[in-house]
Structures are given as C-alpha cells and as structure tokens.
Image (tube, rainbow, N blue to C red):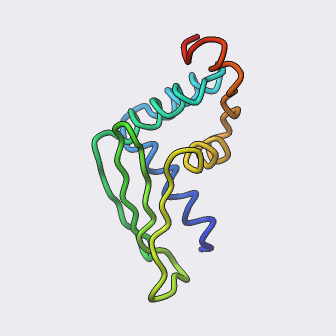
C-alpha cells in the first residue's frame, strides 16, 4: 500500500463510519455545495471523534468546527516522520477528489452568503 492509497482509505473510511453515509454523499453530489456546506457535511460524517486501525494503518478523526483527519501510521512511514494532518482546504480538496464531489464554488458562497 502506498502513502496515497493509505490517505484515500483513511479519508474514505472516516467519512463512512455512520450508517447510510454513502446515500448521504450521493445526495450531496447531486447538488452544488459551498465551502461551508461541504465542511459541515464532513463534520457531520466524522461525528465527535473516532479512530481506526488496520494492518500498518492507523488514523484518527474529529468533527466539530474544524474537522480534521490525522494519518498517524501508514506502510512505508519513516520512524521520525510526523503524522499527516488534513483540515481546512486541504481536507475539502481530498474529500472532493476521493468521493468524486464537484469542488465547491467560492463564487457561489460570495453571492448567497453560504446558503442556497
């Protein structure tokens, strides 16, 4: 497993830890979300906090006002290598890529105040 594959697995699984998450993400794909709406969706799916592990991979996540996913250990990780932290724009970009969600439109949020 490459580092990129580990990142994809951790983010996907963290965002699908609650029942029927895939159906909610499918509904979200159908409409355009602003940055605020996407961050809120990520926060809701992450919940308060959690963690998971599988062979060679360990990650933690938390929702709230600053949703974050932290890759603590992955295959090929060097001994002194720090964890990889995903939050803010970095997290939303990865979520859009991994879940095939259209990138939020910053222009849309300017004109609507974040609400559609």
Image point (71%, 22%), residue name: 107
* Location of residue 83 in the rendering, given as x and y in whole percent from the top left corner: 45, 71
Between 50 and 110, the residue placed more toward the observer is 110
Q: Is residue 97 above or below residue 45?
A: below
In which quarter of the view is residue 59 placed? bottom left
* Location of residue 110 in the rendering, given as x and y in whole percent from the top left corner: 65, 19
Q: Is residue 94 above or below residue 64?
A: below
Between 78 and 53, the residue placed more toward the observer is 78
Q: Is residue 22 above or below residue 30?
A: below
The reply, left or right, for residue 100 in relation to residue 54 is right
The reply, left or right, for residue 51 in relation to residue 11 is left
Farthest-out residue, bottom? 79
The reply, left or right, for residue 18 in relation to residue 22 is left
Between 99 and 113, the residue placed more toward the observer is 113
The reply, left or right, for residue 62 in relation to residue 70 is left
Between 110 and 61, the residue placed more toward the observer is 110
Q: How many marks?
A: 0
Q: Is residue 90 above or below residue 20?
A: below
Image point (52%, 79%), residue name: 75
* Location of residue 85 in the rendering, given as x and y in whole percent from the top left corner: 48, 61
In which quarter of the view is residue 7 placed? bottom right
Image point (40%, 42%), residue name: 66
- Quarter of the image with the C terminus in it: top right
* Location of residue 21 in the rendering, given as x and y in whole percent from the top left corner: 45, 34
- Quarter of the image with the N terminus in it: bottom right
Image point (30%, 52%), residue name: 50
């Amino acid at each position: 497993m490459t580092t990129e594959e580990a990142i994809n697995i951790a983010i996907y699984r963290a965002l699908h830890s609650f029942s029927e998450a895939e159906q909610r993400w499918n509904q979200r794909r159908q409409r355009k979300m602003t940055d605020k709406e996407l961050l809120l969706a990520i926060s809701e799916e992450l919940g308060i906090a959690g963690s998971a592990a599988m062979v060679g991979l360990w990650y933690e996540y938390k929702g709230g006002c600053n949703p974050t996913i932290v890759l603590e250990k992955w295959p090929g990780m060097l001994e002194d290598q720090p964890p990889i932290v995903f939050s803010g724009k970095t997290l939303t970009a990865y979520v859009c890529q991994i879940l095939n969600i259209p990138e939020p439109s910053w222009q849309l949020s300017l004109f609507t105040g974040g609400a559609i």
